[in-house]
Image (tube, helix red, strand yellow):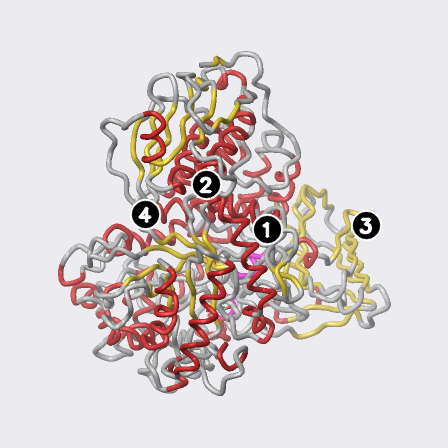
Amino acid sequence: MLTLLVFAFLGLAFAENGIDGWLRYASLPRDVAAGARIPGVIIALNDSVVSPIFTAGRELQKGIAGITGVQLKVSSTTTGNTSSITVGTLDSVASAAGQVANLPELTGDGFYLDTTGSGARIIGHTERGALYGAFEYLSMLAQGNFSEVSYASNPSAPIRWANQWDNLDGSIERGYAGPSIFFKNGAVVSDLTRVSQYARLLASVGINGLVVNNVNAALAANIPLLNSANIAGLGRIADAMRPWGVRLALSLNFDAPRNNGGLATSDPFDSAVIKFWDDKTAELYRSIPDLAGFLVKANSEDQPGPLTYNRTLADGANLFAKALKPHGDGLVMFRAFVYDHHLTEDNWKNDRANAAVDFFKHLDGQFDDNVVIQIKYGPIDFQVREPPSPLFANLLQSNVAIELQVTQEYLGQQNHLVYLPPLWKTILDYDLKVEGQSSVIGRDILTGHRFNRSTNGYASVINVGTNTTWLGHHLAMSNFYAYGRLAWDPLRDETQIVEEWAHLTFGSDRKVIDTITDMSLESWPAYENYTGNLGIQTLTDITGPHYGPNPASQDGNGWGQWTRADATTIGMDRTVWNGTGFSGQYPPEIAAKYEKIETTPDDLLLWFHHVPYTQRLKSGKTVIQHFYDAHYAGAETVQSFPERWASLKGLIDDERFNEVAFRLEYQTGHAIVWRDAINEFYRNMSSIPDDQGRVGNHTWRIEAEKMTLSGYQAVSVTPFETASGRKAITTSSNQTTGTATATLDFPSGVYNIGVNYYDVMGGRAKYEILLNGQTLGKWEGNLEDKLGNTFSSQLNGHSAARVYFKGVNVEKGAVLTIRGTPDGGEPAPLDYVSILPIGRVD
Ligand code: GCU
């Protein structure tokens, strides 16, 4: 056993780009490292480079060197050194060192970790399990925890997959961190370094399968997936991931027999179609011997499926199940996200939320045993709050997996900090009380215990990209980390998870950990507050990029994310007695609760009921006043983030510090855009004023269209609520600089100045702000270069943004000027200027 005294160095302030995520193995502070007890050698009981045990040996070596500075040797056989870290499977450890006495029970990819005595033993139930145990041990060391432990850890469920929605052209559907690490120009990329790095991150949190391509596999760009060059390329991806125990799976295009096989039909009962899939599957297995299976999105959002051929969804799923069966344990993850997106809102009884149960319940028991129904957590689509999908209570004889989303579609697209586990926990901890018995989704249903299933689990859309941060926002990585942790153990506490992640990602400073933890825990409630409350959904632009506010887009189309808001009422009546009947899809006890307004919790009131804006909540407020207040409260919470983050300067490397600081500052501005848009929209619709007089009254605001303009003109903005006062200004030509001027009529003092502008695609306009002719600052309309999501070429809630100039001395009567120089398609748009006394949130 080596004792560490001299070689620990202070692990601060190296620039870091995020590529290692939480696996940085940063050197421990000297005082902490002094307590380290590190064995003298690593024995990894498999010397094949593709073995996860071999990987574990190398990872232990690398991690221990980083954390403690000690360079250990790795051997694949016992060395006689009594102080060793031994990593292997039950069998390999038994044959190398004899039977292990009193070993706790191991299941699935579980492991046993024992650090008592002079060495450490890491024993996997599978090779993958051994690797997980090694990561667990390293995680302890990286957190300066050298305690003696001896325990087994078993996964809650066998399926712990990630889904990438990558297209073959390299774009990623709902990906916000650059193009694909897997594909480019219709083929698999040649350099797969990033793929191995991704597999390492996945493995470190227990994820064992990865679907590498978009569920929308029938998109034209994705049709070549199954050609021979791509099958060979997929084989290379699988090779890159195999040492990490991550198995590859594919999204399939149901119409591939027609699109790739030259057949006239894709009917699952047609013998040529069956042969096509049998042959393709065999070809895939030749390239990927451990193929994990297929993911199928059928008859949904214009994707083809068995219903097209008058066959059932079960017939479609079983077609693939039978093709996989002869080759081993491959699974068909068949998505329950099937619904009609041409519903008419005129019919009060229509409801997209009913779709999953309507489509799947009667098929329960008809799926082959290697089919798993993959169910989104809520009945609609990754909204900021939804009740759990009732399908979990309706499939008692089928394998099921929950589908979560790490990529923040509808949830701020990684430009907003939104720590998601508290949202996921509202589902995982939910007791559906099926047949009157305890049926908690995470603990009882997904584990398989409740309905005696052995092939249940988890999938999450992650959508990492080539950006070195993986997800665009360094802080968004906590969602990735937490997903793996919760799939392993859904009972884990979300606070503990983020603390652990922050420690590993940013170091051991208590202030850093606490600040990140607190902000993360406040972030989802804040986001819900400033986007959509009381179960009304995210209120984003659902026909566009699902990013900025556009409540009107929810209604009047077939997508079914309706709010049914009119001048006096709002909400979906999903009761059995008078509405769509959705509440009746839950078991009786739950159904009864949601059937009545009095027993429906406030946070889902508008999900289940259509009520007047003046309806009183349990809190005593009216619905409309709750909207106003929540939007103010949510936006206010995030205003504090930049300052709290700033207090960490010097405690985190500058590169990550600055990148996070930039996004948090951006979020403060966009939260205000959200707040004002939603409040204006509903004030306009309901004609009910805010009883605190805030909505529509902005004492400290100067509308751009009311300034003295030269080379600028006023324009109307659509949707109206995404411009203060409904109007903005744009330069009159795309060549010449425009000027907007105002004399400030505020008492002399120190102010924070916020300028709201629109950062549209298609140009990088330049702006300058001056006070009495002196430059206060400059900025550029270049968010499309700095943020990872697709912006808009229009002035609206996606492009609306704010910059700040803080602590400015303003004399009463001073002249404020903004100069905007257009560039390409960006006419230097401005909405308003806020001159805010310090501490005031607009
Ligand atoms: C959402 C998302 C789509 C995606 C779909 C799915 O509707 O916006 O991009 O294809 O979900 O999960 O299949």
- Asked whether 326 or 321 is in front, the reply is 326
Which is more foreground, mark 2 or mark 4? Answer: 2
Q: Amino acid at mark 2?
A: Pro
Pointer 2 residue: 52
Pointer 1 residue: 472
How far apart in space, not on screen, are marks 4 and 1 (Cα)?
26 Å
- Asked whether 646 or 55 is in front, the reply is 55
Tell me if mark 2 has few (under 14), some (14-19) or many (20+) residues whose alpha carbon lies within 10 angstroms of its own.
Answer: many
Element on which disc 2 rests: helix
Task: Answer with mark 1 or mark 3, whichever residue precedes in sequence.
Answer: 1
How far apart in space, not on screen, are marks 4 and 3 (Cα)?
59 Å
Q: Is residue 467 left or right of residue 530?
A: right
Which is more foreground, mark 1 or mark 3? Answer: 1
Residue 75 at least partly seen: yes
Disc marking residue 490: 4
Tell me if mark 4 has few (under 14), some (14-19) or many (20+) residues whose alpha carbon lies within 10 angstroms of its own.
Answer: many
How far apart in space, not on screen, are marks 2 and 1 (Cα)?
29 Å
Quadrant of the snapshot with the N terminus: top left
How far apart in space, not on screen, are marks 2 and 3 (Cα)?
66 Å
Secondary structure predominantly adopted by residues drawn in magenta: helix
Disc 2 vs disc 4: Cβ atoms closer than 8 Å?
no
